[in-house]
C-alpha cells in the first residue's frame, strides 16, 4: 500500500515547534495539573506540532523519526512540564504495542490518520474468551495515561493458562466501548490523566485482537527494539527533562532569593555553587549515557541486528540509573530552594513530585539492576519478558 504524507514536516520541524511551545506549556503547567489532563486547546497545538506522527512509519503518513531524535522532542516537553511530556510520549509511541495486529487492522487504525493518539495498558488485568469469530473482553486496567483524549484504547488480557504460564491477548477498542473511571488523584504526574478504565462485557472482532510480542505487521526500525527497552528509555528521558526544568527553576530563583541571615543572593553562596555544579555534572553524565544507549539501540535496529539479552540488560540498567540520577538532581534543586520550594506557585515542588512519580514506574524499578546483573554475569533469569 502506497500512501502520500499529508505534510512534509520533518523531525527538526517538530523539535523547533515544541521548543517554541515550551514557554506556553510551562506557563500552563499548574493548570494542567489542576485539570489532571492537557487542556484541549493546548493539546490541539501539540497535535499541530506533529508530535503524534513523529515516530509513526512513513507508510502510515508519519515522519518516522529516529528514536534518539524523538527522545529529544519528548525531553523538551518534559522540561516544560513532565505531565505533558509523559502524555505525548505515551500517546505518540503507543502504537508500537499494536504492531502484532493483522496488517489490515493496523492500516484501518493508522493508515489515514497520522495524528491518531493511542492509550492503553500492558498489565494483563482482564480476561478474553473466544466466541466464534469474536472475543468477549472484560476487566479493569490502571494507569491508562491520556485515555481521555485517545482515539483508540488497548488492553491486555489473559486468554488462558497453560502449565501455569498465562497466554496473553490484547484487544483494541474505541473510547465509547470502555468506561473511564475518575481515579487519577496522584502525588505526581497529575496532568497525565492516567485513570483506570473498565470493560464489563464487550465483544471485539478477532481482527482487532493480537498476541503481544508476536511478529510485527510493519517492519520499521523502531519496532525492532524490544518494547520494554524502548519504553524504559522513554521513561528515563521524562526524568532528564524534569531535571533540566528543575535546574532552570533553581537558577532563576537563586539569582534573586536572599536566604535568611545571608549576605547576598543564593547564587553567590559557595555551598550552593558546589551543589549546583555537582547536580549539573550528574545530569550531563546521565544524559550522555541515555543518548549513547539510545543511539546504540537505534543503530542495531536500523541494521536489523537481533537484540541479545546482554543488549537488553544494558538498556534497562541504563534507564534505571539515568532515572535515579535525574531524580537526585531534582532533589538537589528542590532542597536548594529552601522554604521557597514549598509553595504551590513554585514549580520546584511540582518537579519534585513529578520525578518521584516517574521513578515509581515498573520499567525503572531498582530491582531491574538485579536482573540485568544476572544476565551480564552469565546467569539464568526467571523472567518471561525483559
Image (cartoon, rainbow, N blue to C red):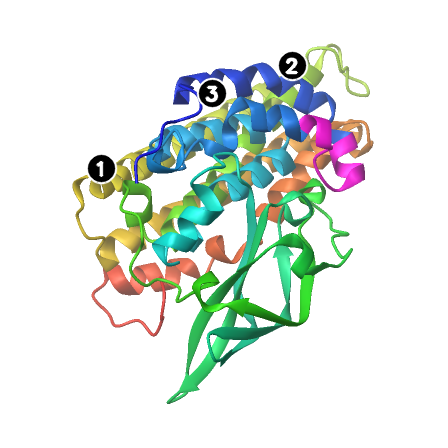
Q: Position of residue 193 (x, y in %)?
A: 69, 47
Label 2: which residue?
267
First in sequence: mark 1 vs mark 2: 2
Could you tell me which quadrant the C terminus lies in?
A: bottom left
The quadrant of the image that shows the N terminus is top left
Q: Is residue 208 above or below residue 94?
A: below
Instruction: Name which quarter of the figure residue 166 lies in.
Output: bottom left
Label 3: few (<14), some (14–19) or many (≥20) C-alpha neighbours in 10 Å? many
Q: Residues within 10 Å of mark 2 (few under 14, many from 20)?
A: some
Mark yes or no: residue 337 visible. Answer: no
* Contact? badges 1 and 2 (CB < 8 Å): no
User: Residue drawn 29% across and 34% down?
Assistant: 295
- Is 375 included in the stretch rendered in magenta? no
Q: Position of residue 66 (x, y in %)?
A: 33, 32
Q: Nearer the viewer, mark 2 or mark 3?
A: 3
**Residue at 35% from the left image edge and 64% from the top image edge:** 371
In the displayed structure, 336 sits above or below 300; it is: above
* 369 vs 255, nearest the viewer: 369
323 left or right of 351? left
x, y percent for residue 358 = 58, 46
| Label 2 residue SS | helix
Residue at the disc numbered 3: 15
Residue range of the region highlighted in magenta in the rendering: 31-42
Frontmost residue, 280 versus 140 = 140
168 w.r.t. 282: above or below: below
Amino acid at each position: 500500500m502506497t500512501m502520500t504524507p499529508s505534510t512534509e514536516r520533518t523531525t527538526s520541524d517538530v523539535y523547533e515547534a515544541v521548543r517554541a511551545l515550551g514557554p506556553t506549556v510551562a506557563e500552563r503547567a499548574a493548570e494542567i495539573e489542576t485539570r489532571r489532563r492537557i487542556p484541549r486547546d493546548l493539546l490541539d497545538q501539540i497535535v499541530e506540532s506533529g508530535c503524534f506522527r513523529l515516530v509513526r512509519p512513513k507508510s502510515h503518513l508519519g515522519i518516522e523519526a529516529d528514536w534518539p531524535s524523538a527522545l529529544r522532542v519528548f525531553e523538551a516537553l518534559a522540561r516544560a512540564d513532565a505531565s505533558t511530556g509523559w502524555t505525548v510520549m505515551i500517546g505518540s509511541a503507543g502504537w508500537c504495542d499494536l504492531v502484532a495486529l493483522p496488517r489490515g487492522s493496523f492500516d484501518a487504525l493508522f493508515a489515514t490518520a497520522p495524528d491518531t493518539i493511542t492509550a492503553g495498558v500492558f498489565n494483563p488485568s482482564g480476561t478474553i474468551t473466544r466466541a466464534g469469530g469474536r472475543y468477549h473482553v472484560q476487566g479493569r486496567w490502571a494507569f491508562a495515561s491520556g485515555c481521555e483524549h485517545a482515539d483508540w484504547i488497548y488492553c491486555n488480557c489473559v486468554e488462558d493458562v497453560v502449565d501455569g504460564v498465562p497466554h496473553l491477548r490484547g484487544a483494541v477498542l474505541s473510547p465509547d466501548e470502555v468506561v473511564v473511571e475518575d481515579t487519577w488523584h496522584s502525588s505526581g504526574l497529575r496532568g497525565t490523566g492516567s485513570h483506570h478504565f473498565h470493560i464489563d462485557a464487550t465483544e471485539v472482532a478477532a481482527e482487532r485482537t493480537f498476541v503481544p510480542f508476536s511478529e510485527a505487521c510493519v517492519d520499521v526500525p523502531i519496532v525492532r527494539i524490544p518494547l520494554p527497552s524502548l519504553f524504559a528509555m522513554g521513561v528515563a528521558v521524562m526524568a532528564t527533562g524534569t531535571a533540566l526544568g528543575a535546574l532552570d527553576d533553581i537558577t532563576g530563583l537563586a539569582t534573586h532569593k536572599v536566604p535568611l541571615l545571608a549576605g547576598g543572593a543564593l547564587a553567590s553562596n559557595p555551598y550552593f555553587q558546589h551543589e549546583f555544579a555537582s547536580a549539573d555534572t550528574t545530569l550531563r553524565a546521565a544524559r550522555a549515557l541515555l543518548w549513547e544507549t539510545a543511539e546504540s539501540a537505534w543503530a542495531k535496529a536500523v541494521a536489523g541486528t537481533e537484540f541479545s539479552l546482554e543488549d537488553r540488560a544494558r538498556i534497562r540498567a541504563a534507564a534505571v540509573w539515568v532515572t535515579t540520577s535525574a531524580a537526585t538532581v531534582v532533589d538537589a534543586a528542590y532542597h536548594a530552594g529552601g522554604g521557597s520550594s514549598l509553595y504551590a506557585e513554585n514549580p520546584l515542588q511540582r518537579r519534585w513530585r513529578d520525578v518521584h512519580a516517574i521513578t515509581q514506574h515498573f520499567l525503572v524499578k531498582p530491582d531491574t539492576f538485579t536482573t540485568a546483573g544476572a544476565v551480564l554475569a552469565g546467569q539464568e533469569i526467571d523472567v518471561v519478558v525483559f
